[in-house]
Image: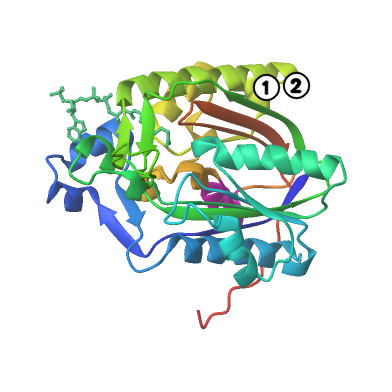
Amino acid sequence: MKIIGTGSALPEKIVTNDMLAGFLETSDSWITTRTGIQTRRLLSKETLSELAITAALAALDSSGVAPSEIDYLICSNVANSYVTPSMSSIILGPLGCCCPCTDLNGACAGFIYALDIADAFIKTGRAKNILIVAAEEPSRFCNWHERETSVLFADGAGAVVVTEGDGFRDFRVTADTHTDVLYYKRAMEQTPYDRVDERTQPLVMQGREVFKLAVRACIKDVDIILQKNGLSGDDIDMYLLHQANLRIIDSIREHLGQQKDKFPTNLQKYGNTSSASIPILMDEMSRAGLLKNGMRLLLSAFGGGFVTGAAILDWSEIKYPEVSSDN
Ligand code: ACO
């Protein structure tokens, strides 16, 4: 499998740390030093499905694959306003795709899980072209009176088109049950037989515990996938890691003894957009011409569950359509 198109979309609204300090007991210096985040994009006028469609259309456009040629649509999404229908069925029609579609909740590792599943479908001949859209609005899981979580999360969408090819070298996806450290619980309706008075509980996160689990799990994944493929950290040209926290990324980089410029980041501008963070970063870098032919990339992400995913691929440059000067 290889990636032949990328796209991304972000909400218009830019929220700075100082804006948050206007209504939360926090500060720009606390948020910047603990996380690296300086601004984030939050949904206000747009809907998440609109972002998902914009990102998907950009990915399709750059791939040269027509919507009608997509054999499968996979959306990576933890939650949105609709429990049903799925995000993928909401965007399928507007995209002009006519194929099976499904949503996948692999938390912040969802994009890598989706790639892994797409790879299996393509290898077994079940599909040729697959559209993967990671669209997330974790800002809507947070209690905005709680500084511990609300300063971290943000909204966005990233998409790729994948097809037959020899770009991907290997995947490693794992899961482990640690449901108490990070969860968002939504109330369901009562029935005559089950009158439990459920309340939606905004995102609960044990920050320090998540930090330790994330660093430990990502280092383990990266070490194992490198070793399995007879590679060392030096053999990777670029590490595209889940954009949750600069200190988590730095801990992984220090373990690998690699230079900072191999670990591109955009969390400073966009915050933690959950499973959308890697495809948004990939799209930005690819459109900026920073991903060159033959570059070896390592993707790694962790998320609630606890689930993790890692992948190694060799990049093939994508030719993006010219942007008209009228835009
Ligand atoms: N502003 C100011 N002070 C704050 C804030 C805030 N926004 N949030 C917490 N504090 C306070 C705490 O109350 C605490 O005060 P105390 O010392 O009086 O008790 C103090 O700051 C230190 O808190 P710690 O929790 O020790 O801070 P830490 O250095 O661990 O940083 C953080 C907290 C940023 C949450 C860190 O633990 C972290 O990044 N964890 C991982 C989070 C993450 O990546 N989550 C997402 C993972 S999965 C996914 O992406 C969906």
- Residue pointed to by mark 1: 225
- Residue at horizontal 19 percent and vertical 49 percent from the top: 20
Mark pair 1, 2: CA separation? 6 Å
| Number of residues whose C-alpha sits closer than 10 Å to that of mark 1, classed few (under 14), some (14–19) or many (20 or more) | many
Where residue 5 sits, quadrant-wise, is: bottom right
Q: Nearer the viewer, residue 235 or 79?
A: 79
Counting labels gives: 2
**Position of residue 85 in the picture relative to residue 319 (left or right):** left
Q: Amino acid at mark 2?
A: Asn
Q: Is residue 212 visible?
A: yes
For the record, the magenta segment spans 279-290
**Position of residue 119 in the picture relative to residue 282 (left or right):** right
Q: Is residue 257 visible?
A: no
**Residue 193 bears which disc, if any?**
none
**Residue 229 bears which disc, if any?**
2
- Residue at horizontal 40 percent and vertical 39 percent from the top: 193
- Residue at horizontal 54 percent and vertical 36 percent from the top: 109
**Which residue is the extreme one toward the bottom?**
326
Q: Are marks 1 and 2 in contact (CB under 8 Å)?
A: yes
